[in-house]
Image (cartoon, grey):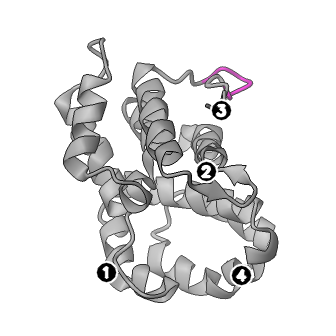
Amino acid sequence: MVNVDLSMDPTMRYIPGDLVRCARRVAILAHTACNQRYGDLPYVAHLADVASNAIAFIDLIDEPARDLVVAAAWLHDVLEDTHTTYSDLREQIINGQHVRESSPTDAHVIAEIVFALTNNKGRDRSARADERYYSEIRKNPLAMYVKLCDRLANVQNAGAMVAKYKKEHQWFRMALNSGDYAPLWAEIERLLGATP
């Protein structure tokens, strides 16, 4: 198991709670069971990058939702890429908590974020992430935040994929930009060398 420091915020303006630790544990176990990789690294490296981005831009999120988005960042690919079902995810979040901090409502909110971020079935990338997919993300501002943290992690570590992200950036921006999360958009565009 990869050991990831959950106090990733050097200013300590946000310290992840038990809900985030539970989500991290669920995500690592699910992705490890599938032996999924992120290039040469275990897939958990990508999940940690997305969670790190969620923490780095956490001031964009109202305080009551902060643990929810960081937990969802850890879990964002669990329905799409593992054998975990929506019901399994909710139950694992509820049962993984032995403190009052998590509730069925928290589990539902996290599961809904993750569900919104789950690609459609399709034979290629454009079929999996079509207008229906982006429409579901637009309906959930917290899902949009996690998606931008995911895209930022992808761009930060794009390697050979950077050309693909550059090519689809205009469509991605048109599909998701609601005017929210401007600092996240700015960082993505800075790394892509794109203009808004």
Which label's residue is closer to the chain start, 2 or 1? 2
Which label's residue is closer to the chain start, 3 or 4? 3
Residue holding disc 3: 2
Q: Quadrant of residue 193?
A: bottom right
For the point 47% across and 25% down, which residue is it? 21
Which label's residue is closer to the chain start, 1 or 4? 1
For the point 48% across and 52% down, which residue is it? 34
Residue holding disc 1: 132
| Residue kind at label 2, given as amino acid type | Tyr
Q: Are marks 3 and 4 in contact (CB under 8 Å)?
A: no
Look at the image and tell me whether residue 30 can be seen. yes
Separation of disc 1 and disc 3 at Cα? 34 Å
4 or 2: mark nearer the eye: 2
Q: x%, y% of residue 126?
A: 48, 87
The image quadrant where one finds the N terminus is top right
Separation of disc 1 and disc 4 at Cα? 22 Å
Q: Are marks 1 and 3 in contact (CB under 8 Å)?
A: no
The image quadrant where one finds the C terminus is bottom right
Left/right placement of residue 191 relative to residue 137 reads: right
Separation of disc 3 and disc 2 at Cα? 10 Å
Residue holding disc 2: 43
Residue 183 tag number: none
Q: Residues within 10 Å of mark 2 (few under 14, many from 20)?
A: some
For the point 31% across and 20% down, which residue is it? 97
